[in-house]
Image (cartoon, rainbow, N blue to C red):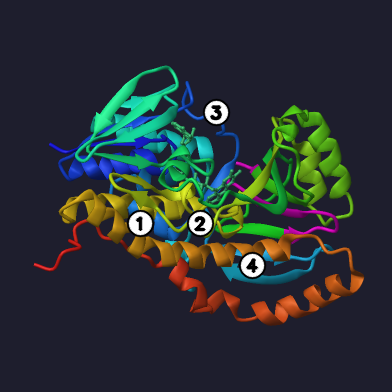
Amino acid sequence: MPRALIIGAGVAGPITAMFLLRAGWDVEVFEADATPDAFAGLFLNVATNGLSVLDQLGLKERLLTDGHRASSMVMRSGSGRELGRVPNGPAGDPARGSVIVRRAWLHEVIRDAALAAGVPIVQGARLVSIDETSDRVRATFADGRTAEGDVLIGADGIRSFTRSWIDPGAPAPRYSGLVGTGGFARVPGLEPTPDTQYMVFGARSFFGYLVRTDGTAYWFANLTSPEPARGSLRGIRSSDWLARLRDLHSDDPAPVPGILAATDGDVGGYPIYELSGVQRWSRGRVVAIGDAVHAMSPSAGQGASLALEDAITVAKCLRDLPTPEAAFAEYQRLRQPRAAAVAKYARAIDARKRVTKSRFGIAMRDRMMPLFLKKAANDTRNDWLYNAEIPWDRSLVRR
Ligand SMILES: Cc1cc2nc3c(=O)[nH]c(=O)nc-3n(C[C@H](O)[C@H](O)[C@H](O)COP(=O)(O)OP(=O)(O)OC[C@H]3O[C@@H](n4cnc5c(N)ncnc54)[C@H](O)[C@@H]3O)c2cc1C
């Protein structure tokens, strides 16, 4: 039975493992963090295309039990005016809209399913070295442990060790110009926003929120900022973040100041990076997937969903093609153009989020956006983002 070493138990790693198990592979997942997911604090969008991958493993319904369906996004100006409504899923098909979930919940659903399927997940195993021979690959971990397999799949995120091993000259992540932050709040009297997430072009920072039926508001803010020194944001206390955010958003329309006033849990900040232009996704028996080869800002709400698409695709390629080299070449051929197109889309959204101080710029945006977005609710031009079906049961090889 062929054996895959999978590095990283974030989104893509355990999903790849589950598909490979179905294909008759032996798998083992190695995760650097000693305990499951230290960075589970916030929430994220799982888009229609990502849900379709989870559905094929029978995980979608469980995920939806604690999700906020948001099939559209409403854009508002800093004065509170509605600028337009855009689909967050295939246009005119709200039942297939994307869903917003706490990151901790997404990880729990994936991890529980992987363990239940019999995928071993080794925590506290940080990959530090890869050695390849003509028919095996060996991984060495920081504590000296080693493991051997037929292939190694690096689902080790934006700071991927695997990517650098495949190509020491691979591009490094680039700062997007935005710092992300966010949290949760209970605001008395705040109406739920079923099916919808709101985005506000605040005067000094971009703000997004939704309100679940139980009255909990999920919110995030994107601050336009020079690149912070590595690790420097970690030392900032929640109370300091909140004080800064309350000030930045004090002139913004309701319910933005109210949500920030009512937030009392942990609030942290993280610089948003993207990674594009990685040319080599594999070398011999080693391949990288997900954020390790194409990380994009959260603006498009697609990073996790593309990682899920990569996971099913790489597993299909290993199932259907005769050698790891052939499988990995086909995987990159299938995935690279789509990842590049989605990343381009995410960058275009980031550009709109960066705060302009020019009054003229703000006036133009508030005037032009409603015209652009007038028919956006039924505009199918972005459906390509969501309608990527990757059926597990369809072979890549014509019989
Ligand atoms: C705050 C935030 C908000 C986001 N919002 C969205 C959103 O709304 N929608 C969306 O689709 N995407 C969003 N994203 C992006 C999304 O989280 C990623 O695209 C997705 O998690 C990528 O999955 P992955 O499996 O490739 O990597 P990850 O989920 O990052 O998993 C990588 C794993 O590898 C482990 N690892 C790293 N190095 C090693 C090593 N050397 N050895 C062993 N293990 C290692 C890490 O600990 C981690 O568990 C957001 C990201 C952030 C940071």
Q: Decide if ligand 1 comes within 8 Å of the CB at mark 3.
A: yes
Q: Which residue is mark 3?
A: 38
Element carrying mark 3? loop
Q: Residue 4, image x and y in percent?
A: 26, 37
Taking the spot 48% from the left edge, 56% from the top edge, the residue there is 278
Of 310 and 321, the residue lying toward us: 321
CA–CA distance in space, label 3 to label 2? 21 Å
Identify which residue, 111 or 272, lies in the foreground: 272
**Given this view, does label 2 or label 1 mark the residue nearer the observer?**
2
- The residue carrying mark 4 is 348
Residue type beneath disc 4: Ala
Q: Residue furthest left?
A: 399
- Based on the picture, tell me whether residue 206 belongs to the magenta stretch: yes
Q: Is there CB contact under 8 Å for labels 3 and 1?
A: no
Q: Which residue type carries mark 1?
A: Ser
Which one is closest to the eye, mark 2 or mark 4? 4
Asked if one can make out residue 282 in the rendered structure from this viewpoint, the answer is: yes
Who comes first in sequence, dot 2 or dot 1? 1
Q: Is mark 4 within 8 Å of ligand 1?
A: no
Is 352 positioned to the left or the right of 384 in the image? right
At 26% from the left and 29% from the top, the residue drawn is 148
Mark 3 neighbour class, 10 Å CA radius: few under 14, some 14 to 19, many 20 or more: few
The amino acid type of the residue labelled 2 equals Gln
Say which residue appears at 59% left-offset and 62% top-offset.
346
Residue 93 visible in the displayed image: no
Q: CA distance from mark 3 to mark 1?
A: 27 Å
Query: Label for residue 302?
Result: 2
Of circles 3 and 1, the one toward us is 3
Residues at marks 3 and 4, CA–CA distance in whole angstroms: 30 Å
